[in-house]
Image (cartoon, helix red, strand yellow):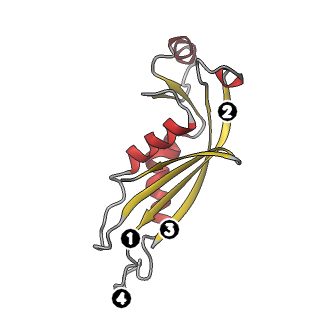
Amino acid sequence: MQITTRLEFDAGHRIPNHKSQCRNLHGHRYALEITLSGDIINQEKASENGMVMDFSDVKKIARESVVDVWDHAFLVYKDDITVLDFLNSLPNHKTVIFPTVPTAENMAAEAFKILKNQYTDTYGNHLKLERVRLYETPNSWADALGS
């Protein structure tokens, strides 16, 4: 069985060497989908009985680990020194330094890496993070998949 939940956040970024408009500072209304697989829990009187995992718990983990960290932040590549210097000149600016250029693909991969060990198999139902899908726009997204 697979379950998926979706969370949304706003963030700015730029792709420093992009051939087009994405080299400029800009932002998106991102959507993050988390897909987990596992057996349906069959434990009488357990809150999660009949579920793979409670959606509210899936969201809570994703919110705390990724969404709240990235929401209303500027996601900047660690080697984009000019932009880093500019952002550091702004008092109390919310900046997240990325190890890679913050493309949809790299953001999805980073979110997967962050979340991979956050979803624990509490009930022995073989819970596993299968996919993190990051929508950069309503019509464009990247999927990071588990192995």
Disc with the residue nearer the chain's start (4 vs 2): 2
**In contact (CB < 8 Å): disc 4 and disc 2:** no
Q: Quadrant of residue 25?
A: top right
- Determine the residue positioned at 43% across, 55% down: 61
Up-down relation of residue 83 to residue 132 (above or below): above
Amino acid carrying label 2: it is Gly
> Please, which residue is most extreme toward the bottom here?
44
Task: Measure the C-alpha gap from mark 3 to mark 4.
Answer: 21 Å
Amino acid carrying label 1: it is Gly
Quadrant, the N terminus: bottom left
User: What is the crowding at mark 4: few (fewer than 14 residues within 10 Å), some, or many (at least 20)?
Assistant: few
Task: Measure the C-alpha gap from mark 1 to mark 2.
Answer: 35 Å
Disc with the residue nearer the chain's start (1 vs 3): 3
Left or right? Give the position of 44 relative to 9: left
Location of mark 1 (residue)? 38
Up-down relation of residue 121 to residue 94 (above or below): below
Left or right? Give the position of 143 relative to 27: left
Disc with the residue nearer the chain's start (4 vs 1): 1
